[in-house]
Image (cartoon, coloured by chain):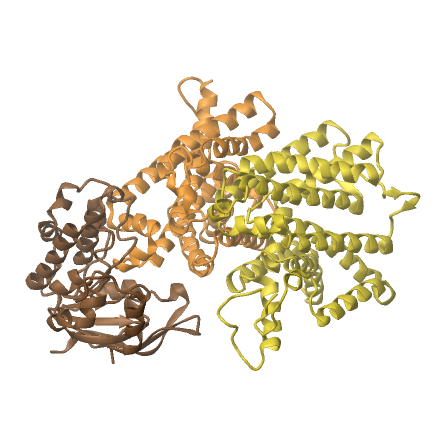
Chain colours: A brown, B yellow, C orange
Amino acid sequence: MSALLELTNVEVAYHHVATAILGVSLRVPARSIVALLGTNGAGKTTTLRAVSGFLGADNARVVDGRISFLGQLINGRPPHELCRRGLVLAPERDKVFETLTVHENLRALVPGRRDGVAGTPVTIDQVLHYFPILADRRRQLAGYLSGGERQMLALATALLCQPAVLLVDELSLGLAPLVVETLMMLVRRLRDELGLAVLLVEQNAGAALEIADHGYVMEHGRIVYDAPARQLMAHADVREFYLGLGERTLRKRYTDVKQYRSRRRWL
Amino acid sequence: MASGSGYFATTYEADLRLVDTPLRWSALCALVIALTALPLLASPFVLELVTQTALAAVGALALNILTGLAGQISLGHAGFIAAGAFTTAMLVEAGWGSPLATIPSAAVVGAALGVAVGIPALRLKGLYLALGTLAMHYVVLYAAGELQTRWGSNTGYTIPPPRLFGLVLKGTLSWYYALVFIAAVVLLVSVNLTRSRAGRAFMAIRDREIAAASVGIHVARYKVLAFVTSSVITAVAGALFAYYRGFVSVEAFSLFLAVEYIAMVTIGGLGSALGAVLGAAFVTLLPYAIDGVVGRLELPGGTEYYLFPAKFGAFGLLMAAFLIFEPEGLVGIWRRVRNWFALWPFRRRPLRSAS
Amino acid sequence: MTQVLATTLVVASLYALLGAGYVLVYRASRVLNLAQGDLLTLGGYLLFAVTATVGAVPAVAVPLAVALSALTGFVIYQVLIRPMAGHPVFAAVLVTVTLGILLRAGIVLVFADRIRHPLPMLGWSNPPVALPGGSVLSAFDLATLGTAVVVFGALFAFLRFSPVGIQMRAAGERALLASQRGINFQFVFALAWALAALCGGLAGMLYACNVRLEPSLDVLGLKAFAVALVGGLDSLAGVIPAALIVAGIEVLSVRYGDPLLSDVSPFLCLLAMLLIRPWGLLGTREELDRV
């Protein structure tokens, strides 16, 4: 099955001199959830920025590689154009318009790709059906919503843009575990009922792998491992470093860590 | 003063030195010799230009201390100059025309005004500070206008040339040496300020006020100090302005004067003393350059008609061009040229941005 | 007394139109457009130029001049403001100052530094109108008042209810998020500038017909920026009480005090406001931290 979103050997450099990500290739097929995992500084956000088109703010550029969406090259296209084509981002910070009410937030966007390609049109009522809390808070200023409600509003507005591929940046950031679980279940529902393709960038690897179909692990700007989610969850190193489920029950001592360093497990 | 070419300071003293390499020493000596010998080589017109540049540079350096170093945007510079000039005028009217009386008094008045503006300014930041100083400008000018209509001549005050210890400061040559010397002193003060405790506090406040406060810098005190330092120097510049022009009237201190000084520091390069001087030279010499260009072109209807709006318009155009295309100003251009030579054959500076 | 009231309302209308321009621009570009006064002057001269070309046909001349005003605002955004996107606020304010300089220079170069009166050229007159209570206003005084009311009503409705208006508010708050939601914020901001230039231009045309037209009218704009600040730079609703207060103080100081004082009274109001309540009457306090 051809991928809706495909990155091939992408390299991004800041200020012409500092390479942030190198040789990154990943694909998001239709009707699937792909997780992109990694610790802070691994390059996940840079990858997402390269795709969604706002690298320029940080004096960064895509130096090499192809990013294609629905078969067309989209290197460096501005965000609003991508949104209209169906590639929608739910950002990590600044997710909602705080001085507008919930209702105005839902209206303040430009839906509609005219090309009729994959992606189900969604109405405001359908969206409120998925996020019933927002219906209760219609007249409230978005700045006064709680963290979980804000994330829901962010997802709702992203849905209203009729995405073919939805990019979600750090869904679980700052949210209680129960809320994270609810939201992840919701994302899975969206994939099942609307046929959405989702690229989930997450630090909370456990929650992400629960719902993902496929996963990529990034370290130091490169993809070091990719596999279907089941396989990832069973991999010893992923279990130890990203899921916190190591075999040892005691804290590692310095000598143990030093031993690990020389072992070079990934390759 | 790293330039990315592999020159590093290895001791604190070396880092703090104002002039650190032999090349810089020679350049400085050459400059001093050139300035001293200029009257022998150049025409009085050129000397006049340099004198005016020096006078403008004093004000520009003062504004650079406030806006470039301490980050407090001020659109009220013309008000401070007017304060110094009017103090001089009033003292001359009262019969105390000696520079020994007027210049310190101008400094005191400037300091008082600096405190009067600086303390309320503590509450304001950024755009609001700029607008507050703009409003203050109008208030000061109103006070000066009232003063002019009620006390002294309605059309303005005439200022005789200053007398000091029997010497009279009159004529191009004397003014040239006097103002270039004063400008050099102010430049030295300004550059020295950047390596002093107060200067570092200013720069910290400019960059991140909250972080500066959390490191123990008394933000309020240093902000007011910045205002006062700048206003004292500016008021003295205003007094010199009064003596140099020989005439003081409130129309000379319009908002355009403040805009000119802001243009000097911005076009020259914000935050750099060299930038203030370059900007002062640029803004002072520009009208003469345009005069030359407009004079060469043959415009119908007499050139005088087109002169004023042309100067005005060209000034605006150049300022906009610098703001859009060259935000670091003339100093930025100078640094790029210098770095190109210093770094060759490498093309790019390492990522840590330096001077 | 009623005359004072009536004059205050007229002066307030003029300031309100200019103040609306300041607020619209601030909401979009986070900068105070110090050239708003020159946009007022430009509006008057556009009316003059269009009338001189088209003749005494007000039904054509006036809409054309208004449209040209709006177009100027659009162009100004694309050419001068858009390139300044990443630069500090200080630099953006300076660009508006240079814009003012350029407009002023251009006007003097094209139209010469003389006083003009477009009203007779349009074939209209400005008779005095007696009002209840013994006060007298000219016809164009009333027109200014009426225009301000209509413009404000239209702006409120636009920003509150129309999709483009909501997008303008959204983009003014967070341009990046707006872009990610499909809003072409560059276009929306250009539209905001066009509306601001339109308000300023309308004020200029009304003043030119009511009083006179000369290149130095930009001082009105400077006094009006005090209105925008007193009301709250990001609050369109705040412009109304602020305009009334500032206009009231100015008219009273002309009547009972020193005429020179009336020129500086808006700035005294401004300074007082900055000391007591910097974010203005109806502005949002958080705005202060954003600058």
Image: C27 above or below A251: above
Position of residue C39 in the picture relative to residue A145 (left or right): right
* Vertical relation: C270 (above or below) B270: above
Image coordinates for residue C177, horizontal then vertical, percent? 29, 56
Could you tell whether C123 is left or right of A255 in the image?
A: right
Give the x, y percent position of residue B240: 77, 45
Q: Is residue B295 left or right of residue A87?
A: right
In which quarter of the view is residue B184 placed? bottom right
Residue projecting furthest to the left: A193
| Residue reaching furthest to the right | B166
Residue A50: x %, y % from top left:
31, 69
Task: Using the image as rendered, state which of residue C29 and residue C219 is in the foreground.
Answer: C29
Compared to A173, does A73 lie above or below? below
Q: Nearer the viewer, residue B85 or B298?
A: B85
Taking the image as shown, residue C167 lies to the left or right of residue C60, namely left
Please state which of residues B148 and C181 is positioned toward the viewer in this rendering. Answer: C181
